[in-house]
Image (cartoon, coloured by chain):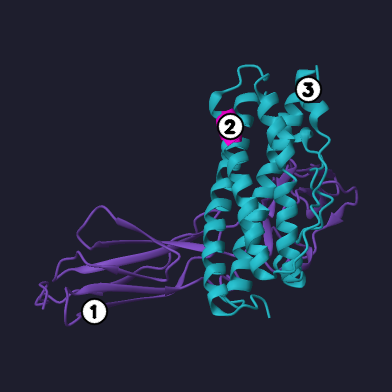
Chain colours: A cyan, B purple
Amino acid sequence: PMCPSGSSCRVSLRDLFERAIILSHYIHSLSSELSQEFDAQYSQGPEFFTQAMSMCHTASLSTPAGKEQAHQIHQKDFVILVIHLLRSWTEPLSHLIIEANHLPKAPDTLIAKAMEIQEQNQRLLEGVKKISKLVDPEIIDNGDYSVWLGLPSLQSNDLESRLFAYHNEFRCLRRDTHKVDNYLKFLKCQIAYDGSC
Amino acid sequence: SPPGKPVIFKCSSPEKETFTCWWKPGANGGLPTNYTLTYYKEGEDTIYECPDYNTSGPNSCYFSKKFTSLWSVYIIRVYATNKMGISASDERLVDVAYIVEPNPPKNVTLEIQQPEDGKPYLWIKWVPPTLADTASGWLLLQYEVRLKHEKAVEWEIYFAGQQTNFKVLSFYPGYKYLVHVRCKPDHGLWSKWSEEHSIEIPSDLNMNDE
């Protein structure tokens, strides 16, 4: 069974999950605010950003899109998947912060939020790694993540293209942080509470 | 004349597993008019038709679990067709992750508790709405309670977190109290308030610690 080293492992797992969920909930809330703040600041009409929708760089990660799919993933693999999702944003976040300074009239609050998300994302990544070790000491994390190739778009000379790129990154960040938050809340109940919170 | 333009006015999911969209028909041009909902998903070209026009009532499309994916944008449109022509609604972009609006909590019960070693309190209990699977952790609900006595104007509103019960310590004997409860997912929309429940507080209730 999960958590082979007995009840003390389960207590610390519950504690680790609770802490991770506080972080993941906070990170997603910040990401939602960041996305809305950017759109409010730079949108040039109601449908302006509708055409900006393009695939997220994490689309290649096979993530469950519903509860039944979530139940079908082995819990160890699911924890690793969360780690991959989190790790996939380490590089984009650092570039977003650097490049955002070049946006016209870039609001300080927008950059501050992105920096806060970057910091907390890193903490959450470390936390979920700890969880994975408790779930299974022999768990193997091959360091995988989705490669991000979005830097040239963030540096585009054409302002509209650049705004579309930022919009899409913040939209994808909002989506993936929601996934991570949702998955951690689900895994907490499945792993640390035997499937029933 | 051709039909008027339909309007998709709402899409929502009660439990983050299925969802429904509703539309308002436009003018029907005095002719029998047929409505068709079509959709495609972000990053895909295939256009699908509504899988179920019935489950959620008239002028609606219900997407069961089989047809529901979170974190994927659905681009939805409704067409109205009669003998004179066709008209299409504006596109509606929907990500089910962000349209979760649960049904109200159920089975609200009220009772006065008089512990031996403390003040009496009004104990409000309820259960999550139907269909909401909070046990698995897929859906996390938070609750809010509002109450007032019959003669009061303002509601007192209390946030109960994820608990499904709440204790109210400050109330007046001799009054009838009205109570509602509602819920909200961690990242979603408040439900409507539950049905009203009420309780008469006995006038002779001793409000001091025993």
Query: Residue A37 — which label?
Result: 2
Which residue is at a point 73% across and 68% down the rendered structure image? A76
Q: Amino acid at mark 3?
A: Gln
Q: Position of residue A69 (x, y in %)?
A: 76, 67
Q: Is residue B135 left or right of residue B195?
A: right
Q: Nearer the viewer, residue A176 or B25?
A: A176
Q: Which residue in the structure is indicated by mark 1?
A: B113
Quadrant position of the N terminus of chain B in the picture: top right
Magenta region, main secondary structure: helix
Horizontal relation, residue A137 to residue B191: left or right: right
Give the amino acid at mark 1. Answer: Gln
Horizontal side of residue B26 vs B133, given as left or right: right
Q: Of B69 and B1, which appears nearest the observer?
A: B69
Q: Residue B208 falls in which quadrant of the image?
A: bottom left
Residue B187, percent from left and from top: 56, 53
The outermost residue toward the bottom is B116
| Label 1 secondary element | strand
Q: Which residue is painted at 86% across and 49% down in the image?
A: B83
As drawn, A60 above or below A103: below
Label number found at residue A155 = 3
B79 is higher (above) or lower (below) than B49 = above
